[in-house]
Amino acid sequence: MALVARVSTRRVFSRHLHSPFPSPLTAHAFIPLPSLTSPCLPARNRAVTACLSSSAPAVIDAQTAGRWKPMCLYHTQGKCTKMDDALHLAKFNHDFMVDLKASTRSLNKLRPQNLDYLLVLDLEGRVEILEFPVLMIDAKNMDFIDSFHRFVRPAVMSEQRINEYIEGKYGKLGVDRVWHDTAIPFKDVLHEFELWMKKHHLWVKEQGGLLNRAAFVTCGNWDLKTKIPEQCKVSKIKTPSYFMEWINLKDIYLNFYKRRATGMMTMLRELEIPLLGSHHLGIDDTKNIARVLQRMLADGVILQITAKRSSSVPGDVKFLFTNRIR
């Protein structure tokens, strides 16, 4: 199994950035991160948590631990204003390719797919959707193509309830400040997402609204079977047609490797892929699911749609695999 090192940015906060950690780096050693103040905002709005992708314990490959950096969560949403600031760029990652670069040595077993692009999606938020992250992967060569990431402001909650909800969900990850700075209503998220899909020629509303040689990839059925329709109902919009089918990676994993994986963490552990970032931060989970997907493609998996929603009865979902995770 790959050697891993544990990084606790929470501990860095509590120590005011004075590193008490041992050196040189060894497995499970704590390592310091650079100054965590957010240069994405004016000084009066700066908070030490603002640009972080995580402050909960994270596990990274020991070989890359010295250069691993948290994602700037303003950049992932196209809102970073410090791209010409060398100090900021030294502190925060602005390139998904750093963590999602496919090795050319992994292409030997790669098989032709019936899809051109894979849209890895992992929603966050149980009451209402709080985060909508998507990573676009080329099915032919496993390359990362582009990302879409938005924090989502609940539609019907009171401001007090929103504050409590966000503190409980993102406060412990250290990213509540960036959420408050950037979150927009779900209707606006879908509008911007549709523009993003059109830019990549993934979707044309006038042609029936289905994805064009692309498919969503999720870790489970909950995201598209349950949560998207629920949020659309709360937001008083019709469930978009591009959400009518998807690939549940759990079912693909079960049928390809002939073993059951209950979730992303199990897949990472069994495939000996180290976790990057924080579990339950949507953009980090999406990145880790994409890394599992890249590994499965490299191992020779052929992807297929695993579930389809009825166009006439939206609540009716047909599961296409007999052997599936229930």
Image (cartoon, rainbow, N blue to C red):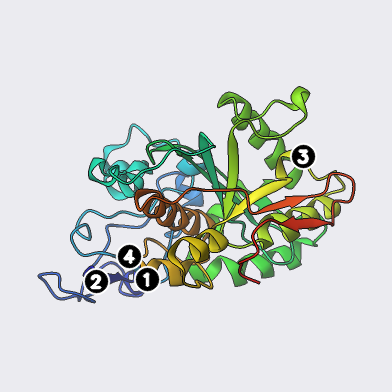
- Tell us which disc is closer to us: 3 or 4: 3
Give how far across and how far down residue 282 sits, in percent.
54, 57
Q: Amino acid at mark 3?
A: Ser
**Is residue 78 visible to us here?**
no
Spatial separation of the CA atoms under disc 3 and disc 2: 42 Å
Residue that appears at 37% across and 71% down: 269
Q: Which residue is mark 1?
A: 270
- Tell us which disc is closer to us: 2 or 4: 2
Disc 4, SS: loop
- Tell us which disc is closer to us: 3 or 1: 1
Give how far across and how far down residue 32 sits, in percent.
24, 66
Marks 3 and 4, the one that precedes in the sequence: 3
- Determine whether label 2 and label 4 are within 8 Å by CB: no
Spatial separation of the CA atoms under disc 1 and disc 4: 10 Å
Residue 320 in the figure: left or right of residue 94: right
Q: Amino acid at mark 2?
A: Met
Spatial separation of the CA atoms under disc 1 and disc 2: 9 Å
Q: Which label belongs to residue 274? A: 4
Disc 1, SS: helix
Residue that appears at 52% across and 48% down: 303
